[in-house]
Image (spheres, rainbow, N blue to C red):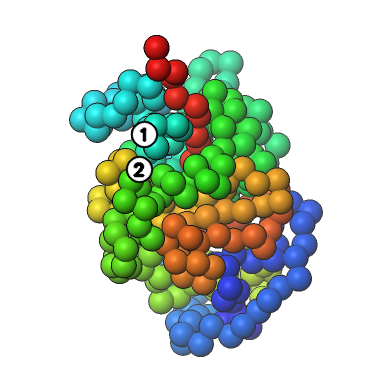
Amino acid sequence: MLGLLVASAGCAPGSSTAEQVTPRLLVHASLEGGVAALVERPLKAKASALAAIKESVTPESVADREANAGQVFASAGGSTRCPAEMALVEDRVCVDRWESSLVEVTQSGERPWSPFEPIDGRERRVRAVSWPGVIPQGYISGRQAKMACAASGKRLCSTDEWVSACRGPEHTTFPYGAVRERGVCNDDERPVHPVAEIAALLDLKSEALWTTAMNNPLVNQLSNALLPTGEREQCTNTYGVYDMVGNLHEWVDDPSGTFRGGYFMDTTRNGEGCKYATTAHSFGYHDYSTGFRCCMDPEPIE
């Protein structure tokens, strides 16, 4: 039932797009008890749990967030060849320090987009930003991420650029070193899969687990799941890029569809650390676990 989960990629065969992928389902034994307990919760307890999760997202203005970010950017240092929110990697590419968020562009100005909502149908009205200390954007496809980067004068990182930034100047397997250290990045793997938990709380049928539940805004609002950008302060390297392993999968510029780095429920099944790569979905796929960051060419040396 709800204990059936994708054990290979941390993602599922459905999306809000028309894409359908044949599932490769395995029983994730460690989740059985937790899901069963959720299913048996009294309705009153379920309602209370949902009330604690669901919130109306009313973030501060873009100007307020830019001001807060400016303080962090000023202390972060970096190269004058890249914008303040980006790090210069191998003297050849600027890479966003933090996983991307979105702002919506309206006639009256810009406002932060809820990171818990897909942008289907509004791709041309948002642009990518890189801010510390905020929930990054999930629920986004590679195609949408590419457009959001372009709207800010940037681009999706190539595979080589992304891996170089992740491994750091020391070329280690993980941003922080050669050997995995549990909990340094957001790779804790909560005991109950977040999609299964939401499906149980909402009394969704098992067939909905791989369709509507995968893009439910509540998934990334659960506790012990997605974290604000840079919260795991040691999940970085001397380039000063954060969260490149864990937290959210990150799309790279591959029209065939590749996201890298793993996310908070899986940083091992498709490679270790910076070598992690999932190729199971098209460039138009998205779910709660898919995010991104942007790159751009640095200013030339005069």
Element assignment for label 1: strand
Q: Residue furthest front?
A: 302
Q: Residue furthest top?
A: 302
Q: Amino acid at mark 1?
A: Ala
Q: Position of residue 188 (x, y in %)?
A: 36, 68
Q: Residue furthest left?
A: 75
Disc 2: which residue: 241
Q: Position of residue 20 (x, y in %)?
A: 77, 62
Disc 2 packing (10 Å; few <14; some 14–19; many ≥20):
many
From the viewer's side, name the closer residue of 281 and 226. Answer: 281
Q: Are marks 2 and 1 in contact (CB under 8 Å)?
A: yes
The C terminus: image quadrant: top left
The N terminus: image quadrant: bottom right
From the viewer's side, name the closer residue of 261 and 264. Answer: 261
Which image quarter: residue 24? bottom right
Give the mark nearer the N terminus: 2 vs 1: 1
State left or right for residue 257 relative to residue 166: right
Element assignment for label 2: loop
Residue at x 57% of width, y 76% of height: 7
Disc 1: which residue: 87
Does residue 213 appear in this view?
no
State left or right for residue 170 relative to residue 276: left
